[in-house]
Amino acid sequence: MQKPFVVFGIRDMEDELRPMALFIIMRYIWNKVRSELKKRILVVDEAWWIMQKEDSASFLFGTVKRARKYWLGVTTITQDVNDFIVVDIPGIRKFIFHHSIG
């Protein structure tokens, strides 16, 4: 991740493999962020897909909560905020409504 812009694409991957690939990618990114402090932005497009599974939703939620400590800005993109609201992770609704930009 030495380039100024890095894209991880899993669109063409089989549906059964996506959760594992996504977890590996997110874990890799998180380890890189923690290993070298510098200003970065993580953009998660189609975040609704991550929010479908409790494990990946919880991992993303934890990453967002700790990101600022490591100079990381996180932007999630979804077409419907309800994709985040329906996930049953303690504190996520409060987090969404207090951290969203109108």
Image (spheres, grey):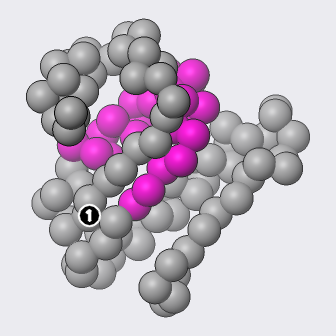
Magenta span: 42-65
In the image, residue 62 lies in the stretch drawn in magenta: yes
Q: Mark 1 points at which residue?
A: 72
In the image, residue 57 lies in the stretch drawn in magenta: yes
Asked whether, in this view, residue 8 is left or right of residue 62, the answer is right
Who's the residue at 36% across and 50% down the image? 75
Place of residue 53 in the rendered image (x, y in percent of width and height, measured from the top left): 56, 23
Which is nearer the eye, 9 or 88?
A: 9
In the figure, 92 relative to 68: above or below? above
Which is nearer the eye, 82 or 60?
A: 82
Q: In which quadrant will I find the C terminus?
A: top left
Q: Is residue 77 visible in the rendered structure shown here?
A: yes
Place of residue 30 in the rendered image (x, y in percent of width and height, measured from the top left): 40, 60
Q: Is residue 55 visible in the rendered structure shown here?
A: no
Q: How many numbered marks are there? A: 1
Q: Which amino acid does label 1 sit on?
A: Leu
Q: Is mark 1 on a helix, strand or loop?
A: strand
Place of residue 96 in the rendered image (x, y in percent of width and height, measured from the top left): 24, 27
How crowded pointer 1 is (Cα within 10 Å; few <14, some 14-19, many 20+) is rated as many
